[in-house]
Amino acid sequence: MNNWQGLYGHPQIKNFLDKLNGSDSTPQALLFFGKSGVGKDFFAFRFAENSINISLNKIGEPTLPFESMVDKGLIRMIYALPRGKNEDSDDDPLIKLTTKELENIKEEQKRKISNPYYDLQIAGANQIKINSIRDVIRVLSLNRDYRQKNFVIILDADLMRVEAQNSLLKMLEEPPPNTTFILTTSRLEFIAETIRSRSWMVNFGILFDEEISKILEEYFDIEPERFRDLLPLANGSVSHMMNILSGSESDIRELVIEFLRNTMAAKFNSGYKLLEEFTEGESSRLILLIDLVSIWFRDLTRFRIGNDDLYYKEFVSAFEKFDSRYKHIATGNIHKKLEYYRNILSNTNVNQSVVSFNLIFALADLIYNFNQKK
């Protein structure tokens, strides 16, 4: 029997995967794609666990939890790792890493298995090494127990460079019996077409606010009071919601206020420099900044009507200074523009710098147009 307990959303995908596990064969490769933070990794873990337990039952063996399957090598996880000193592409992927790096990897994998909604935070890990792919190929080639199912789960598969993808492709062309590969990605365009054509594609949509709320409470132990008012900004993603919540730290909120102060004072270079430092060239970070700016203007409206339920409550003096000079300024249009820029970043491949400059000028125009009317 398939177990989906603890997974939220995507009922159609659950039904589809149930049917796969109820059939006589499983595809050689599944490609789970969709935006980050919607549960793709969790579904990969649970589908593999369900499938293996069904096969264990058929041969009279007791069922196992996911962690035990990983320990026994029935499920192999591949993810980005740091590169060791003088490491060669034929080396074991872990052999030349330091003790500290190995401890970090072990702890992060443990956290990921315990909470599949968690994003791995492995220092220095920016690509999936070809070593990791070759190591799995070597191990699978030695496996002769074809009664038992095996799974290889590749997290953030878009982090494989060309060489690693080519190595994986060779395995997909002649896969070992009873072995299924599951790739997860939020950047489908970085997966080679040859791999896509050999995989069953599973498209994950976004999560509903109530589903995100349950995940935050159950898997991250976050009280609803901390996020309830921010859920409309989650954009259907647990990861994005966690980024917003991490932005509640004073230093990040202070940076947002400094960015607003500079841009609305027409100090474009200073504003752009702060924006670049914050986003680090990542569109997801720019979306987060837009959300934090949007929250600031929402809080300004609340401040004006005496509502003290503010995200920026530690910086109420900023609202006081703003209102002392621009008490009658209208902010309705800026919300529309912020939403527009956010949608462009989320749904197109627009140049990020173009959006950054337009954002800065839109904020500056808010003050300029107000002064022109005086």
Image (cartoon, rainbow, N blue to C red):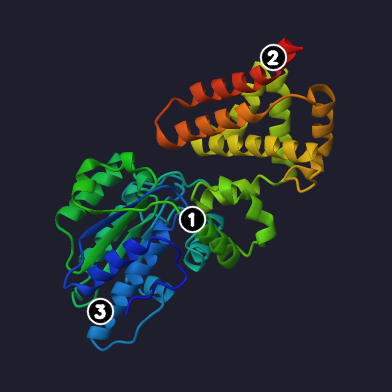
Crowding near pointer 3: few (<14 within 10 Å), some, many (20+)? some
Residue 281 locus on image (x, y percent): 52, 31
Is residue 161 rendered to the left or right of residue 300?
left
Q: Nearer the viewer, residue 366 or 96?
A: 366
Crowding near pointer 1: few (<14 within 10 Å), some, many (20+)? some
Q: Nearer the viewer, residue 324 or 8?
A: 324
Residue 152 locus on image (x, y percent): 31, 62
Marks 2 and 3 close (CB-CB < 8 Å): no
Is residue 151 rendered to the left or right of residue 373?
left
The N terminus is located in which quarter? bottom left
Query: Is 371 above or below relative to 259?
Result: above
Residue 206 locus on image (x, y percent): 43, 51
- The structure residue drawn at horizontal position 62% and vertical position 28%, both measured from the top left corner, is 334
Residue linked to disc 3:
55
- Can residue 139 be seen at all in this image of the molecule? yes
Crowding near pointer 2: few (<14 within 10 Å), some, many (20+)? some
What is the secondary structure assignment of the residue under circle 3?
Answer: helix
Marks 1 and 3 close (CB-CB < 8 Å): no
Q: Tell me the kind of residue under disc 1.
A: Phe
- The structure residue drawn at horizontal position 36% and vertical position 45%, both measured from the top left corner, is 158
What is the secondary structure assignment of the residue under circle 2?
Answer: helix
Tag in front: 2 or 3: 2
Q: Is tag 1's residue or tag 3's residue first in the polypeptide sequence?
A: 3
As drawn, the label of residue 208 is: 1
- Can residue 266 be seen at all in this image of the molecule? no
Residue linked to disc 2:
368
Marks 1 and 2 close (CB-CB < 8 Å): no
